[in-house]
Image (cartoon, rainbow, N blue to C red):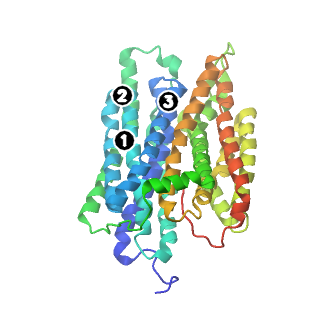
Amino acid sequence: MTPSSAPIVPKENRLAFILIASCFGLWGMMNMITDTLVPAVQKIFSISTEQSSYIQVVNYASYALLAFPASLLIKRFSYKTGVLVGLCLLSVGALGFVPAGTTQVFSPLLLTIGIMACGLSVLETSCNPYVIAMGPEETAVRRLNLAQTINPIGCLLGLFVAKYLILSNLNHAEAAERATWTLEQKSKVLTHELFYLALPYAILVAVVIGIIVTLFIRKMPEGRDTEHTPHVWVSIKRLLANRRYASGVVTQFFYVGLQVAIWTFIIKYTREAAIFTVSADGKSIIPGMIEADAWYSLMISMVVFTLGRMVCTALMKKINPASMMATLAVIGIGLTIGAILLPGYAGVASLILVSACMSLMFPTIYGIALRNLGPEVKLGASGLIMAILGGSAGSFAQGRLIDVFQNSGLRADVAIRYSFIVPIVCLVVVLIYALSYRRFCATAPAGNGGPVAGH
C-alpha cells in the first residue's frame, strides 16, 4: 500500500482511536474550566487575588511534575496502561470536588485539582504517542493532527460549561457585602455556588468511568514504546549541554506563564479594570458586569487564538517561523502595553488580540528545541512538557503583584492593569529566543515532519 492510499486510521483501530481522541477533548475542556475557576473561587471564598491564583499554581505544578514519571510509566508498560492510570487519577480528582465543596473551605479544592492535574498529565503524555502507534508510520502525523482537532472543541465546550454552570450561578454580591452576611445566609449561598462548581466534575466522573469500562471490555492495541534509547542520565546530560534545547525549555516556561496569566486574569481585567465605575470616595471601584458576562472576553480570546494558529500554520510554508514568532512577540508587547494604558473596551480588545500573537508560540518553540535531537527527542519532549510549570509561576506572579499594588495604596483597576508587566516580561523572553534562532529555522528542510505539539 502506498503512503497516499494508506488509511489514516486502520479499520480495526477505529473504535480505539475514537476513545483516545475523546481524551484530547477531555483535557482541553478541563483546562478551560480551570482557567475560569480563579475568579469564581475568589468571589465564593472572598479570598485575595494571590490566594485564588493557587488554583493555577497547583494545577500546572502537578501537571508538569508528572510528565517525566508518566513517560517512564508508558516506557515500562504500555500506552494503554498510561491512559488507564491517567483516567483513574482524573476521576478520583474530579470526584473529590463533591466532598471538598461540602466543607465550604478553599484548601481541600486545591488537593482535588492537584490530583486531577496529575491524571491529565499522565493522560496527555500517553495519548499522543498512542495515537501515533495506531496505524502506519506514513500517516502518523495526519492521525495525530486529526486527534488534536478534538482539543479545541473540548476547550470551547469547557468555556460554555464554566459560564452556564459555574459563573452564571455565582451570587452577585462582592466581598464587602458578603462580609456583612450572617453565618446562615453565607452558608446558604456557598452551598448553592459550590453545588454548581462541583456539578460539571461529577458529570465528568460518569463520562470517564464509561471510557475506562470500554477500554477494559473492548480489545485495544496495547501500544508499546520499543525504540532503543540511551540511558536516561546520559540523555539528560546531552540535553542540558544543548544550548538550543535548554534555552527552549526556559522559553517554553515563560511562554506558558504568559498564556496562563493572560487567560486567567482577562475576566478580572474586563470587569474590574476596563468596565467599572468608581465609588463616591474615589478609593474603590464597582465592577461593571458580572463574571458570566465578562466571560465573553475569554471566549473571544480562545476563538482568536484558534484562528491565529490556523493562519500562522499556513504562513509558515512561506515565512521563517522564528521570524514570525519574533514579529508577533513585538506586536504582543505593544498590545499588552495598550491593555495597561487604554480605557474601556479598547483595553479589552488589546488584551484579546494578544491571544492571536500567542497562537504559534508553543509549537514553534517546541519544534525549534527538539529538532535534530535524535534518540533524545522523546525525553526532550517530556522536558518541554514539564516547562508547563511556567503556568504556575505566571499566574502566581501576576496575582501577587495585584495584591502588592493594592496594598501599597493603588486603586484595584490600576493594580490590575500594572500587573500585566508579567506577560510583557514573558514576551521579551520569547522574542530573544526567536531572534536567536532565526537563522537556524531558515535551514529547516522542506516538509519537515518533526514533533507535533499543541497547547
Q: Return the disc, 3 or 1, that comes first in the chain's sequence.
A: 3
Q: Secondary structure at mark 2?
A: helix
Contact between marks 3 and 1 (CB within 8 A): the answer is no
Task: Give the Cα separation between the discs numbered 3 and 2.
Answer: 19 Å
Asked whether, in this view, residue 55 is left or right of residue 373, the answer is left
On the image, the x and y values in percent for residue 108 come to 36, 30
- Asked if residue 135 is positioned above or below residue 151 in the image, the reply reads below
**Is residue 148 or residue 453 the one in the foreground?**
453
Residue 52 bears which disc, if any?
A: 3
In this orientation, does residue 196 appear?
Answer: no
* Residue at image point 67% right, 44% down: 429
- The residue that mark 1 highlights is 115
Asked where in the image residue 136 lies, by quadrant, the reply is bottom left
Viewer-side label of 3, 2? 3
Q: Position of residue 353 (x, y in %)?
A: 68, 47
First in sequence, mark 1 or 2: give its number. 1
